[in-house]
Image (spheres, rainbow, N blue to C red):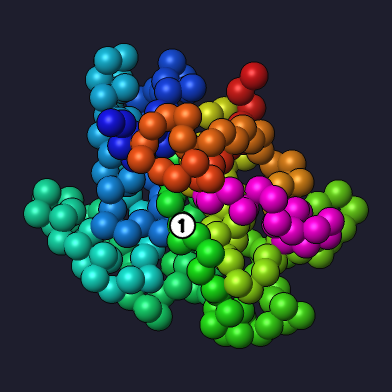
Amino acid sequence: MISRSDVFCGLVFLPIADKIESGTYLLYDGACGTGGMLTVGEDTLHEIAEKKEKKVATHLYGQEINAETYAIAKADLLLKGEGEAADNLVGAPEHSTLSTDAFPSKEFDFMLSNPPYGKSWKSDLERMGGKDGIKDPRFVVTHGDDNEFSLITRSSDGQMLFLANMLSKMKHKTKLGSGIAEVHNGSALFTGDAGQGESNIQKTDNSHAARRRASDWSIGSPCCSTANWLRGSDLN
């Protein structure tokens, strides 16, 4: 059985494998758990580069709200001798990605994530000033003629906000741009009336998206799971 991490790494890296050049690449996961997607992503990128006889350096960045899984991720990197990567992991309950962005000025080449499904983000919402008080540029953006286009979703489910967070960290001034692969359950595609955050996130035009049911890949996910694959770049 193919692992979920393998599928998402394939989505992010394989479409642009022939465009990988020697250089430094930044990988990010805003709900990194034990760090599996980051490390598999790093390994995949190095394998592609080696086949092309390219030399690449990778830097991993992650954020995780659960103290136990965060500790495992950090310990795993330290045991592998990746102390710098371990320093770039931020975690514990006070470090929620939604209300406390650990990397507000960073843009990343590749982003992979499996955020929590159906989990309330009401406490984050309150810390951010409530729906009428949120000014975070990740979630209130300029779209068309609207300078306050809201990506704020229902407080009962914050999974699509993790996608909005990643959209805000895409590179737009490089040829390769940024690639995102993120898993959601099916409700993320079918909730949100016109003008609501879920609907508005799917309207943003800074990337091209393709969605497919995760059951099609036999990765042990429920049939209602979906994968979002996005790439924003100058590539044709």
Front residue of this view, candidates 223 and 167: 223
Q: Quick one: which residue is furthest to the right in this view?
A: 145
The answer to whether residue 63 is left or right of residue 35 is right
Where 46 falls versus 228 (above or below)?
above
**Circle 1 sits on which residue?**
115
Q: Quick one: which residue is furthest to the front in this view?
A: 223
Query: Is residue 185 found inside the magenta-colored segment of the image?
Result: yes
Report the residue at 49% width, 41% height from top: 223
Q: Which residues are magenta?
A: 184-200
Report the residue at 56% width, 33% height from top: 212
Residue 22: which quarter of the image?
A: top left
The answer to whether residue 98 is left or right of residue 149 is left
Residue 28, how many percent across, how many down?
Answer: 41, 50
Residue 172, how many percent across, how many down?
Answer: 62, 40
Front residue of this view, candidates 59 and 80: 80
Report the residue at 30% width, 22% height from top: 49
Residue 117, how many percent across, how many down?
Answer: 50, 60
